[in-house]
Amino acid sequence: MRRAVCPGSFDPVTIGHLDIFGRAAALFDEVVVAVGVNKSKSATSNRLFTSDERLEMIAAAVSPWSNVNVQGFTGLVTDFCRDIEAQAIVKGLRGSGDYDYELQMAQMNAHLTDVETVFLMTDPSMSFVSSSLVKEVASFGGDVSGLVPPAVFERLTARLAERRAGA
Ligand code: PNS
């Protein structure tokens, strides 16, 4: 059984993430989307969605793939990989900015354990998509409806409206 982990914060999950999950699902027997659920204030203060909400949205979005599931994790991603017996971490690379950041993490993770990091190049049609830009653009009323799954778009719109209303 070849098992891969796709780790991230996914606040919220985008079409770019889903493209990577689907392509990883074609390469591995099982793909576990691992949502960082660190409860520390610094990790949660700038999140739009709680970890439970992010898990729920991803579970719905990956339901078409029978070999993809989602789990929360705390602590080191390498410990999570060991605990669930995953051999690889799969990440998408959009460009050189991602590469610089991801290379260092991949090398640190290789120093800590024997888990391999596998990079998939982002589909060029999605290389501008990031959770943070989606949130920023949506917060100023820009149309991000094609950049996240429809159910995520609904929740994003509702959450931003709540925030604007001071809820
Ligand atoms: O969505 P992000 O910010 O790219 O997600 C980053 C994440 C959660 C994948 C990364 O911060 C991570 O792996 N955190 C777990 C803690 C850990 O293992 N840190 C050392 C990484 S070398």
Image (tube, rainbow, N blue to C red):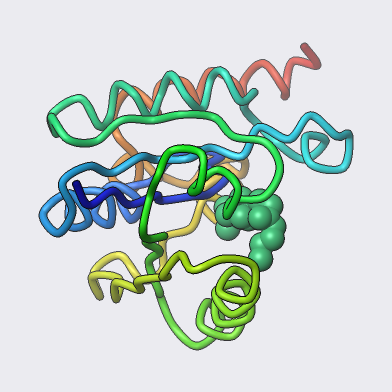
Q: Nearer the viewer, residue 143 or 147?
A: 147
* In-front residue for pair 146/97: 97
Q: Identify the residue shown where x is 59% and y is 80%.
A: 107
Residue 95: image x %, image y %? 44, 83
Query: In the orientation shown, which residue stands out farthest toward the top?
Result: 167
Residue 132 in view, yes or no: no
Relative placement, left or right, of 56 versus 107 is left
Residue furthest right as drawn: 41
Residue at left offset 56%, top offset 39%: 11
**Position of the C terminus by quadrant:** top right
- Side of 88 relative to 45 (left or right): left
Quadrant of the image occupied by residue 56 = top left
Residue 165 to residue 108: above or below: above
Picture mark count: 0
Q: Where's ligand 1: which quadrant? A: bottom right
Does residue 156 lie above or below 8 as drawn? above
Can you see residue 68? yes
Of the pair 63 and 159, the residue shown nearer to us = 63
Q: Is residue 47 left or right of residue 126?
A: right
- Residue 20 in which image quadrant: bottom left
Q: Residue at x 57, y 55 (%)?
A: 78
